[in-house]
Amino acid sequence: MISRAILILSMWILSSMAATGARSYFTAITGDDSNSGTQAQPFRSIHRGVLALRPGDTLTIREGVYAEAIEASIPAGESWSTPVTVCAFSGEKVIIRPNASQERAFTFRGPQHHIVISGLIIDGANTPYDCIKITNSTTTGPSHHIRFQECEILNANEQGILVSGGANYNEFRNLKVHNCGLSGRPHKMPLDHYHGFYIATDHNLVSGCSVYHNAGYGIHCYDDSKTSANFNVVRDSRCYDNGVAGLSGAGIILSSGTGNCAFDNVIFGNACGIAVDYSAVDTRVFNNTVYGNRKYGIYVSSRSRATTITNNISFRNGWNPQILDDAGQDTALVTNLSGVDPMFVDAAGSDFHLKSGSPAIGRGTAVREPDSAAEVDTRANRTMRARQDIGAYEHR
């Protein structure tokens, strides 16, 4: 899947270069930083490569293991039409694995925006903190509009991906995020407080990701100041086998903010399923399949208000397996299927499509969904979906 996506990206890059005059540079472990950066004469380091980039340019990295940390050095693009792109060469395995003297693999802060990172394996085994941090600078403000796609993020000692400090409008598409927080730094925080994603800003998109085997939560949306973590969208993702360090790790938690949304996700085998908590307001959870989590399936706490839970399947979860756990204020529960066998194709094999005759088919309610882009304020840009099955998958 990664190779095909990179090939499509490469074709797009070539057409864009012809149209805009953008340039393409290359880095290879056989290269030299004194080279010109062409494919025939590549740079040796990623750091040298990104210094050459301008809006619309691309740095393509050849196969190998790079012991580098990319610390706030990638220049800004202009828009999603003319981003700065750093990607793996099509069909080649590129591993970014910083050494122990470096804090993270990627850090974005200050005036970094419209940057695309594609096709890389980002391994944080040697570093003490997160694999990726997108945050702010005290002098030049926050980064924003950073897109990671078709990447694998693993072995972070803290968060796989941390977004903080007002760094809004980021996108995470088709990622694998796993085995994060399992070592951690116990003197700082319990292991179960390190997650696959920790999102504490606004208007971020998590789409098509597989998030699994992380110490705490799979996807954690929370800001302790209660001023951020608003209008985030988590969709079309599989969150499973999270909460390795204890009982507190849900597949997804949407908390503290306003207007967060999770839909079309499959959540199974975690400590918990989906949680709405910590003063969350106007949260929407719809068309998710939540199965076989050790604690609850879907939980809305008494600290949450105006939550809408629609068209979800919750089945064979540990606590209160027959109902959705709702203690919230003004919660709307609409056409959910809970405690009734939904007739999955093969739950033991993690295939949660519906068999013919399932009680979830055709029993849902029409809902409006957020626009697909994190660019758009989800309060005002929703389209009506035609499908009305319950759960993450439409029966065909």
Image (tube, rainbow, N blue to C red):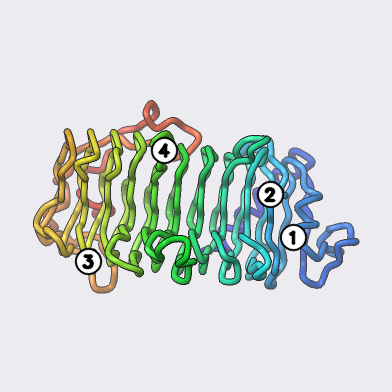
How packed mark 2 is, by other alpha carbons closer than 10 Å (few <14, some 14-19, many 20 or more), is: some
Mark with earlier residue (2, 1): 1
CA gap, disc 3 and disc 2: 40 Å
Q: Is residue 296 above or below residue 390?
A: below
Is residue 122 among what the camera can see?
Answer: yes
CA gap, disc 4 and disc 1: 36 Å
Given the image, on which type of amino acid does mark 4 rest?
Answer: Ser
Q: Position of residue 233 (x, y in %)?
A: 39, 43
Please give the name of the residue rendered at 25% of the width and 56% of the height, measured from the top-left corner: 289
How packed mark 3 is, by other alpha carbons closer than 10 Å (few <14, some 14-19, many 20 or more), is: many
Question: Residue 26 vs residue 295: left or right?
Answer: right
The reply to whether the C-beta atoms of the residues labelled 4 and 1 are less than 8 Å apart is no
Residue 225, numbered label: 4
Residue at image mark 1? 46
Q: Position of residue 204 (x, y in %)?
A: 47, 42
State the image quarter where residue 42 is shown.
Answer: bottom right
CA gap, disc 3 and disc 4: 30 Å
Given the image, on which type of amino acid does mark 1 rest?
Answer: Ile
Given the image, on which type of amino acid does mark 3 rest?
Answer: Arg
Label 3 SS:
loop
Residue 62, numbered label: none
Mark with earlier residue (4, 1): 1
Single out the mark in the foreground, 1 or 3. Answer: 3
CA gap, disc 2 and disc 1: 13 Å
Single out the mark in the foreground, 2 or 1. Answer: 2
Residue at image mark 3? 294
